[in-house]
Image (cartoon, rainbow, N blue to C red):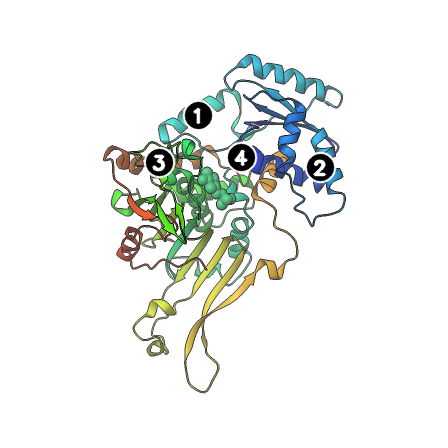
Amino acid sequence: ENESTVSITVVGASGDLAKKKIFPALFALYYEDCLPKHFTIYGYARSKMTDAELRNMVSKTLTCRIDKRENCSEKMDQFLKRCFYHSGQYDSEENFSQLDKKLKKQELSASSGNGWTRVIVEKPFGRDSESSAVLTKALKQYLAEDQIFRIDHYLGKELVENLSVLRFANLIFEPLWSRRYIRNVQLIFSEDFGTEGRGGYFDNYGIIRDIMQNHLLQILALFAMETPVSLDAEDIRNEKVKVLRSMRPLRLEDVVVGQYKSHSRGGVTYPSYTDDKTVPKDSLTPTFAAAALFIDNARWDGVPFLMKAGKALHNRGAEIRVQFRHVPGNLYNRNFGTDLDRATNELVIRVQPDEAIFLKINNKVPGLGMRLDLSNLNLHYAARYSKEIPDAYERLLLDAIEGERRLFIRSDELDAAWALFTPVLAELEEKKIIPESYPYGSRGPVGAHYLAARYNVRWGDLD
Ligand code: BG6
């Protein structure tokens, strides 16, 4: 495969995602010799730019992430020489066919005639069931489902991919993975910055569409699925879609929404969401949401899956927390006083930052008395592995080039994900539900605690 030729077109080349993630990921793949020998990258966007200007723009965000080897700048130059630019409108057939001509010229020398075309699509995949179906239909007019690679970059994160390994390659977890032993599961996403200029995109979507309907729900599906027949992409996605289709319709009372407000701390004033110039002053778009979800199948009946996602909170991180049930008839109960929740086992998968997996277990505090405390069995990636963790986009772009579909979203998964959130999103918007405000840099609205408490859950704090 490495001998082959590939042309990559980055549509939206002057945008944030291209600059911050796509070009750096392509460079990292090039650096690691993962790209085919003959490749060209075309940036496509509306702005007028020369090849040299594109290269200059791209060079600013490339980093020698991988152990800062000496020949990095040389490699960078070689990489940049393979980057070109074509300016055009997104809705102009003519502009795209000009690009097509350029690509064909490049490919002619190496073409063996049995190539492929794949399209990687980033979210938003519409903003509800209906608009998503329109998009799917439009894509399917030109592409077969197996040519469409819908990206959810959370699936490319190391610890998300590891979820299945943890569960299916270790005897000790899978037997516990059900309502019999698991009391609740928490999926937590938190950012310590606001929309800061991205409000134009964000205000149309809000945090439920931006994070929950995709990133957190995908983690939930992987977490909760039945054992797939094999590791084949179709087998895995068949199981994920079953979970999504088994979800109980989400009710408005099981959702809490919030929006951040200006806050001053240490002499610095942090802005409100609506201070963002790209956001309407009267916007009701949530920048925070919490939700209680249920999977109505035999394995998960009655187990709350709580999601929480927010911007402008007190810290940045993403975690999966699995709280186990109390030990029945625990001999040591009296050592915990009245707060048995504090004494339950918990498995924490810290997706980012500082990747780690902990298992909280009760342990005797060394000494003459009998005092117990909850301590961590700790798999801390930085301490255990010397290798750097690749960025999610590196893995996903490589998979797409290799035709591996396991970590991409199939259209039926997407439909099921929208079916879950569309009614509640419509209700929030129709009823003009006012989001609870929370100060920039805080832990978010208290409503999230009441919601969790209704299901006897206490949110874990990002460790
Ligand atoms: C994107 C969202 O999908 O994920 C952004 O659109 C969010 O709003 C980002 O900031 C978070 O990704 P990561 O990899 O930095 O956690």
Query: In the image, is the residue at mark 3 within 8 Å of ligand 1 by its beta carbon?
Result: no
Q: Which mark is residue 434?
A: none
The amino acid sitting under disc 3 is Ala
Residue 348 visible in this rendered orientation of the protein:
yes
Distance from the alpha carbon under mark 4 to that under mark 2? 19 Å
Distance from the alpha carbon under mark 4 to that under mark 1? 21 Å
- List x then y, in percent, for residue 365: 46, 79
Q: Nearer the viewer, mark 4 or mark 3?
A: 4
Q: At numbered mark 1, what does the secondary structure look like: helix, strand or loop?
A: helix
Residue underneath mark 3: 419
Residue underneath mark 4: 17
- List x then y, in percent, for residue 336: 35, 75
Residue underneath mark 1: 135
**Left or right: 420 as drawn, with respect to 359:** left
Q: Earlier in the sequence, mark 4 or mark 2?
A: 4
Q: Residues within 10 Å of mark 3 (few under 14, many from 20)?
A: many
Q: Nearer the viewer, mark 2 or mark 1?
A: 2
The amino acid sitting under disc 1 is Leu
Query: In the image, is the residue at mark 2 within 8 Å of ligand 1 by its beta carbon?
Result: no
